Amino acid sequence: MRIAVLADIHGNVLALDAVLDDLAQRGGADLIVNLGDCVSGPLWPRETMQRLEALSLPTVRGNHDRRVAEDPTDEKMWPSDRYAQERLTAAQREALFALPLTLEIAPGIVAFHARPDHDEKYLADAILDGQLVRAPLAAIKRRLKSLDPACRIALCGHSHRSELIRIPGGPVVFNPGSVGCPAYSDDTPPAHVSEQGTPHARYGIVELDAAYRPDRFEAIAVDYDHEAAAKQAEQAGRPEWAHALRTGFIKD
């Protein structure tokens, strides 16, 4: 079985289309799973949502999916969430909020956005000197306690950082990186940044044997017209997003 793993599209329909085209050129997949944060961002939330609705992928709810769906539009709302909220229909917002927190997509394979018990807390990451880095193994194991012991593969996103970690006595954790947002800053204390270091669209492929055991993992980076995405962010008044889309960094 071949599973394609998408995460953190953030309204970047150009990056999503590039990923889907690349996947088709590689022979496609038996299943494509979407790990959430579908539309939040100053790009193409409506168009991205329409594309995902047509694909009807197994999808889990990201923290920004929840925020776009339920946060009140006021001065405290994050600008990327407000931009998406204003451009989606009520039915689309309701569909985002109704997405599950976790989803078993195949025997022993569980998908979630951030952690299995929370959509906004990091699983495999810690903050060091204002940067996301890999968390200590003991911390990752503790954060996975709510998972069924039978879980062999845990698919997650949220940090936008590609990770592959085999937990001793536990599952393999796989984060494919972000499809549509290669770098971001978060002012929530402690303030930090996540930077992929290039503007590529990222996704992953997991190959399983007949017993649904992991046979192969691929983290894939795909070039696309990131300049068009950056210009769209500029038109929306978000120069920091434009810089991130062009470079994969928050600052030079």
Image: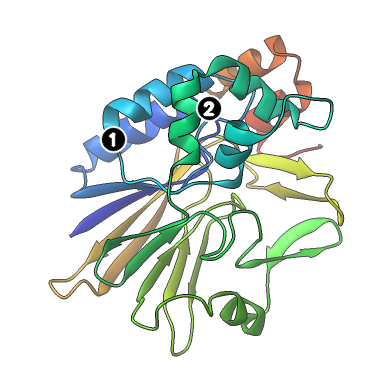
The furthest residue to the top: 235
Question: The N terminus is located in which quarter?
Answer: bottom left
Q: For the residue carrying disc 2, how many other residues have a C-alpha within 10 Å: few (<14), some (14-19), or many (20+)?
A: many
Residue located beneath label 1 in the image: 56
Kindly identify which numbered label has been placed on residue 11.
2
Q: Residues within 10 Å of mark 1 (few under 14, many from 20)?
A: few
Q: Nearer the viewer, residue 81 or 251?
A: 81
- The amino acid at mark 1 is Ser
Quadrant in the picture for residue 6? top left
Residue in view at x 59 percent, y 36 percent: 181
Q: Residue 60 at what x, y percent from top left?
A: 43, 49
Tell me if residue 58 can be seen: yes
Relative horizontal placement of residue 25, taking residue 193 as reference (left or right) = left
Rendering quarter of residue 57: top left
Name the kind of residue labelled 2 in the image: Gly
Image check: 251 left or right of 33?
right
Rendered residue at 21%/47% (across/down): 29
Q: In which quadrant is the C terminus drawn? A: top right
